[in-house]
Amino acid sequence: MDAFFIPDGDRFLPTDHTRGPWSAEHQHGGPPSALLARAIEQVPTGGLPMLVTRMTVELLRAVPISPLTVRTEVLRPGKKVQLVGASLLSNDVELVRATALRIRTADVTFSFPPPPPPHPLPDAATPFVFPFFRERTGYHRAMEVRIARGTFGTGALTAWMRMLHPLLPDEKPTPLQRVMIAADSGNGLSVALDVSRYTFINPDLTVHLHRHPVGEWVCLDAVTLPEHHGVGLAQSALYDEQGPLGRSLQSLLLEARS
């Protein structure tokens, strides 16, 4: 159980740490996103130094807590820009699809002071646990969360997040995996509607990065914008303890609970 997934041949067995808030049988979107990020990172770059600068995840179906397989392909090879695709499947049914843009890295000299990270930093931020998960064991207990700014339930919140377990046993999570497993929580942090009366499920996640994080902590400065026609948008500015990393966006399907 000391991991989000257990490898089993060419399959991955989700543990209870992947469980999401809407159903005891289905995963939070963060762990599958991180698992696809891992698969994309293992696709060779052709010996070129590359950085994943954009990853878009389409959550096509609810992801069960049951055996999964991963498939990858190079959609666009190149020396400066590459596009890689990955899919998460259950019994040959595609559940999640991801595309990742990779851009070559090179030394470029210039002077530009980046803005500082949000304060307080993790050590001085307030511990927090997502309050709307149905089960005791799940993603909300497998991630450590600390609030830096804001009040939960007001539509805006800045929080630091880090993994309490590796993605796979005895395998150190990569910076990209740390970002992707946290970024899908933007809408959960910046809750704008009463969770006892509404659901706000995101069918997608897009993360743009200009660099990958240093260290375990990823910060989401998150805002949710709901609309009366049943659609919303969650957007997060992403940081580590050194400064900004990029941005994430989630389209939201808003519904009143029956």
Image: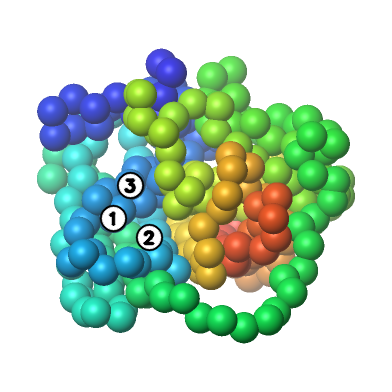
List x then y, in percent, for residue 39: 27, 49
Instruction: Answer with mark 3 or mark 2, whichever residue precedes in sequence.
Output: 3
List x then y, in percent, for residue 184: 54, 50
Q: Which mark is residue 40?
A: 1
Q: Are marks 3 and 1 in contact (CB under 8 Å)?
A: yes
**Kind of residue sitting beneath label 2:** Glu
> Does residue 21 lie above or below 160 as drawn?
above
Mark 1: few/some/many CA within 10 Å (<14, 14-19, 20+): many
List x then y, in percent, for residue 146: 75, 37
Q: Is residue 147 left or right of residue 24?
A: right
Q: Are marks 1 and 2 in contact (CB under 8 Å)?
A: no
Task: Indicate which label's residue lies in the foreground, 1 or 2.
Answer: 1
**Kind of residue sitting beneath label 3:** Arg
Q: For residue 230, say whether it is visible.
A: no
> Does residue 104 lie above or below 203 as drawn?
below
Q: Which mark is residue 58?
A: 2
The residue to which callout 3 is attached is 38
For label 3, the SS is helix
Instruction: Answer with mark 1 or mark 2, whichever residue precedes in sequence.
Output: 1
- Give 97 or 108, whichever is nearer the viewer: 108
Task: Indicate which label's residue lies in the foreground, 3 or 2.
Answer: 3
| Quadrant location, the N terminus | top left
